[in-house]
Image (cartoon, grey):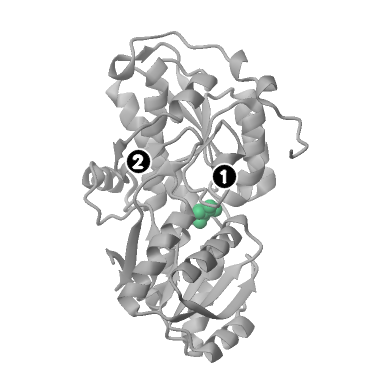
């Protein structure tokens, strides 16, 4: 239907050779090194998330290598927060490195292009922060271990309504990014379901720095809260300008706000920010305290949601590889879609055949520069 030259029969999944493994599950041993590609935004606008993802994934595979049986090599690429570089990185990993699977990319904005290439090459791709609507539906080889923004917002908006008694809100969103526009649609649906009135709706673009016009309209509409769908690059100046203009209403957002980098950059303006997401340092999920301690020791900074999701992806891929005890791309694809209730640091998590993840969202509020459960 898309007109692309892609069909299940022509992808190259079956051409990659099975490795020589023996045993299954915890007893699986594979002789060859298993190559896993990773594409994250390590520089430019989305590096706030990508650098944590690189670290979380590396920690996960380091632990798995120490556990024995399989040796993993992560081949890490930087997409520089650019669609073009992301496509080039996927191409290199698929054709040159012949990886067994790819983790990433960081932004949905790149995934909508790169996943078409992964699908047609028959290489399993596992997103760890690609939260826009429609991503797993891109193909049989496309999966995510990242809580959809729809689920995060469907939790954070009702939680904010209950905590703050919202009846009317302003909606502001970046209309030049796939993730933020997708989230804006969800926001409007959830507000409608919750009987919350939209008294102002304003848009901007990813690289904008001056929000005076939009914020003046918001101020005049006197909302009880501002629901914001933006990446951190725009969020920081926007929220600071809102406070300077005298907008005191609480600000509610989703997954992109679950970042200590963002909270640090907002300084005092972070107070009261309500954030829906996939992980909290305050959750007592299995292994979370140990993960936080090990990560902090290794990298000299505390992990965030993006690190936690990438770390979890290493374990999910390991499960999928161990199930047949080879790193054949087609077998990994089949097994990733059958991960039923894995007990992770994100809480119980499962991936279905369609590639979609199921897990509980977490809603947090920022107080004195720190995330606390709402
Ligand atoms: C997406 C996202 C971003 C906020 C991840 C950093 O969720 O692009 O889907």
Q: Which residue is mark 1?
A: 135
- Residue 322 position in % (x across, y down): 37, 20
Q: Helix, strand or loop at disc 1?
A: loop
Q: Helix, strand or loop at disc 2?
A: strand
Above or below, comparing residue 261 to residue 291 in the picture: below
- Residue 77 position in % (x across, y down): 56, 38
Residue nearest the observer in this picture, 289 or 348: 348
Above or below, comparing residue 137 to residue 200 in the picture: above
Residue occupying image coordinates x 54% and y 41%:
136
Q: Which residue is mark 2?
A: 349
Residue occupying image coordinates x 58% and y 40%:
137
User: Is ligand 1 less than 8 Å from the beta carbon at label 1?
Assistant: yes
Residue 176 is left or right of residue 336, and the answer is: right
- Residue 34 position in % (x across, y down): 46, 21
Residue 99 is left or right of residue 65, and the answer is: right
Quadrant that contains the N terminus: top right
**Is residue 47 visible in the rendered structure shown here?**
no
Quadrant that contains the C terminus: bottom left
């Amino acid at each position: 239907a898309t007109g692309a030259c892609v069909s299940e029969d022509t992808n190259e999944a079956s051409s990659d050779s099975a490795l020589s493994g023996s045993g299954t599950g915890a007893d699986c041993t594979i002789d060859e090194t298993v190559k896993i590609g990773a594409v994250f935004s390590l520089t430019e606008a989305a590096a706030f998330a990508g650098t944590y993802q690189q670290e979380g994934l590396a920690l996960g595979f380091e632990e798995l290598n120490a556990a024995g049986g399989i040796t993993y090599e992560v081949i890490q690429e930087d997409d520089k927060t650019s669609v073009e570089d992301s496509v080039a990185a996927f191409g290199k990993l698929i054709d040159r490195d012949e990886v067994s699977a790819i983790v990433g990319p960081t932004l949905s904005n790149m995934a909508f292009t790169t996943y078409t290439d992964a699908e047609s090459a028959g290489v399993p791709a596992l997103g760890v922060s690609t939260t826009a609507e429609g991503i797993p539906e891109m193909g049989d080889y496309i999966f995510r271990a990242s809580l959809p923004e729809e689920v995060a917002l469907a939790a954070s908006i009702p939680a904010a309504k209950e905590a703050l008694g919202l009846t009317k809100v302003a909606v502001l969103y970046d209309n030049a990014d796939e993730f933020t526009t997708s989230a804006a649609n969800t926001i409007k649906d959830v507000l409608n379901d919750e009987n919350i009135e939209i008294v102002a709706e304003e848009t901007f673009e990813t690289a904008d720095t001056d929000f005076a016009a939009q914020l003046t309209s918001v101020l005049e509409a006197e909302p009880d809260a501002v629901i914001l769908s933006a990446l951190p690059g725009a969020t920081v100046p926007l929220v600071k300008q809102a406070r300077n203009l005298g907008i005191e209403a609480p600000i509610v957002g989703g997954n992109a706000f679950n970042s200590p980098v963002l909270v640090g950059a907002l300084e005092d303006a972070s107070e009261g920010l309500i954030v829906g997401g996939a992980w909290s340092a305050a959750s007592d999920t299995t292994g979370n305290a140990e993960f936080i301690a090990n990560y902090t020791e290794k990298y000299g900074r505390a992990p965030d949601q993006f690190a936690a999701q990438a770390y979890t992806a290493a374990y999910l891929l390991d499960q999928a590889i161990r199930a047949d005890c080879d790193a054949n791309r087609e077998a990994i694809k089949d097994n990733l879609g059958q991960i039923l209730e894995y007990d992770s640091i994100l809480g119980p998590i499962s991936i279905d055949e369609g590639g979609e993840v199921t897990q509980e969202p977490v809603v947090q509020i920022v107080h004195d520069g720190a995330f606390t459960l709402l």
